[in-house]
Amino acid sequence: MADAFDRIARPASGAAPRRSGGAPPPLSLYVAPVPEDAPPPLASHIRHGAPSAKWTYRDREGGALFHVARFDAGDGSKVVLPLTLWREAGKLRWQWKAARDPRPLYGLHDLAVRPPAPVLIVEGEKTADAAAMRFPDYVVLTWPGGSKATGKVDWSPLAGRDAVIWPDADEAGRKAGEEVARRATSAGALKAAIVDLPGFLPPGWDLADDWPEGFGPAAAEAAIAEARRRAQSGGVEWPWGFRMEPDGLWYDQPTPQGVSPTRLTSHFEVLALARDPQGGGWSVLVRFLDPDNREHTVAVSRARLANGAAEVRAELAGEGLVISPQRGKADKFAIALAEVKSARRLTLVAATGWCGNRFVLPGRVIGPIGGEEVRFTGEAPALHYRQAGSLERWRSGVAAKAEGNALMTFALSLAFLGPLLRPLELEGGGVHFRGSSSCGKTTLAYAAGSVWGGGGPLGFGQTWRATANALEMVAYGHNDGLAVFDELALVAPEEAGAAAYSLASGQSKARSRADGSLRARSEWRVAILSTGENGLADHIRAGRRNDRPMAGQELRLLDIAAGAGSGMGVWQELHGAVGPAELSDSIRSASCADYGHAGPAFLERLIADRPAAIIKAKATLAQFIARASRAGDSGQAQRAALRFGAVAAAGELAATFGVTPWQTGWALGDALWLYHRWASAFGRDTPHERSEIIRLLRGAIESQRSAFSPIGDRADGEDGDKEDPSPLGRDGEARSLVTLGFRQVRGPVVTYLFHPSGWRTVLKGHNAVEAAKAVEAAGFLIRDGDGRLQKTVSIRGEKHKLYAVSGAVLQHDVGD
């Protein structure tokens, strides 16, 4: 049946199409189920006349949703049209147009009132009614729109049911049957199998037609029974010559005398064919018992089967599957797995995070019931997604201690940010809590990590002491969640900046395959909480290469001093503890006893009403930006405000959901206080690169004053003073072996004149010209008389092109 639903033009929103010129048409809203005050359905079509048949689609309670009418033409053709109810300008009226997607199944009410009955799915309403008469023990279903509309139907009511599909006897029917089977299992049907029809049936024959010669009710019952038998085996079909028996996989080797049965492996079960969310990485999911009767489930990659299966056999044998080591038998085992078919499909994911409208955690998928099963295949033990204790005890022992403690509120709010990054279209990144030993920063990490799990040496956290590849895999494993890294000093300074970029950017290093082609990169989006005694910028500077930190690195991992200004480290309110150490110990103890409940509870509430939750998060973010912004804020300050605001939005949602015991407004207020404190230190009205350049110049002048040869007020561009040849300068200071330039004194005015080489030495990593422009923008560079950035100065009869910097730079506040 052609998809008449799609032949009727309609906008995706359900509103009538706009006409050119004039007033827009009234808003048209689809109405279902049909209310009691609705007018009667149209009795005829303006062009096709009265229908020859009409079917009513009903909901699970039996309420009418819409109708489908069939019109027979004189030439034997037919037209099938949907009749739906719409509200326009407050009035209800019936229209010959399609229902909203996803479309309901025909027979929902029967499905609801007969939960134990098996399901038979056919194509077409007329066929469904006829099949229900012929097979009264089955709930017979169909879908609206015909063979090409299977993707526009809500198949979720089949979740938990066994289904058999009876296709029409033609190529289009066969393809539609395969698509229905796939969508049914994806929607959660326990089993779905397609009836194998004999080849002698008339083309297009279905169960509404008379029984053809040689195929009657008994043969039809047998065909359904065979399909159900195959469904009981999971719809698994082994290639020719192979069979699975209770004692294992066998191959029937042809011989002149017949066949010679050969046992290849012990028994295992093929659960499904699986692939990643992008449709790649096809695998066969197998399950078996080892010799100690412990169950193992393994995804066997078909790519590895095709590329020599020795490693696959070794891994399965290591898990306890008995595989014959004889070469011929081993090769046949690989052939069997490479070619086995299964009607069931699974989605495999190696990282946590969003998969459609569901959220994948190791051992648990949170989201709507039904749909294709998703399995986590990552290294769950290494990620510490575990649970202990209870949510209520966590609320009282951990989250309640955030009251009056801004840093604690912020750290816990950050823990809830990961699942919101994609819905809010934000990049990954996070914060680095910097402070001395025993200030409480590690307690913040334990508390935040307890939102998602614990039980590891650092609770939920990981150490910074790892290779770049390992850090990437940690972030990948915590995709759409929280990654906690302890003690930044454990990563080499020369690697720290690149690690911050990589973790926040959400993409692994590009790597090639053996043939030179590019491998697919691992991608993630993660909220990061880091701790250390030094900040990222200071740690990078401490390296052997004296690298300079980039503003982008610091904005991806915002440096927050782990001190609340109260003299108690990160704490402002002790909640009855004798001192800050006792409070830290109690929170850390509670974090190690009750963990892994708050994050899943947050996800359940988020998914239950995701549109409203995202609207609230965006509103909180906008409110934060409005309250945090000041005139003249640099783009970097605004970018940081966006991150602080996102953390505030996550904390406010957690309070709204009741996951945390906070009052609404706490997370927002504490994030605002921390942002203003951070902005004051970072510099909010000047680009950070400019502040960094001024800081470097000022530091060089202060620490290497003797590297500037003094010249008097006669160095005016024509006749400078002669250089003092003595080992001591005119002011008695020892001369430096390093020469950066000259110090010119004209009364109270001091100017520092940098050699180009000295300029590049001091500002290593910055472009010399761009740095000069930045110094000029700050008001400290003195241009030459002709406007050039370098000033021409004559000293001892020689002309030098120097960068002239006003001594006032020493009094400039750069936030340190």
Image (cartoon, rainbow, N blue to C red):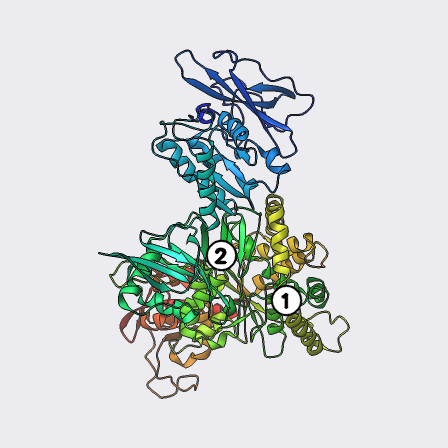
Query: Is residue 17 or residue 189 the one in the foreground?
Result: 189
Seen at 52% across and 13% down, the residue is 45
In the picture, the disc for residue 374 is none
Q: Residue furthest right?
A: 576
Q: Residues within 10 Å of mark 1 (few under 14, many from 20)?
A: many
Q: Is residue 60 above or below residue 615?
A: above
Q: Is residue 639 above or below residue 804?
A: above
Amino acid beneath label 1: Tyr
Seen at 66% across and 33% down, the residue is 61
Q: Total label count? A: 2
Amino acid beneath label 2: Arg
Q: Residue furthest left?
A: 256
Name the image quarter holding the C terminus: bottom right
Whether residue 382 is visible here, answered yes or no, is yes
Q: Residues within 10 Å of mark 2 (few under 14, many from 20)?
A: some
Query: Is residue 13 or residue 268 the one in the foreground?
Result: 268
Q: Is residue 413 left or right of residue 241?
A: right
- Judge depth for marks 1 and 2 and give the one in front: 2
Q: Position of residue 478 (x, y in %)?
A: 50, 62
Alpha carbon separation for disc pair 1 and 2? 23 Å
The answer to which image quadrant residue 506 occupies is bottom left
Name the image quarter holding the N terminus: top left
Q: Position of residue 208 (x, y in %)?
A: 47, 25
In the picture, the disc for residue 375 is 2
Q: Position of residue 80 (x, y in %)?
A: 47, 21
Q: Which residue is mark 1?
A: 595
Q: Position of residue 474 (x, y in %)?
A: 47, 66
Q: Is residue 199 left or right of residue 163?
A: left
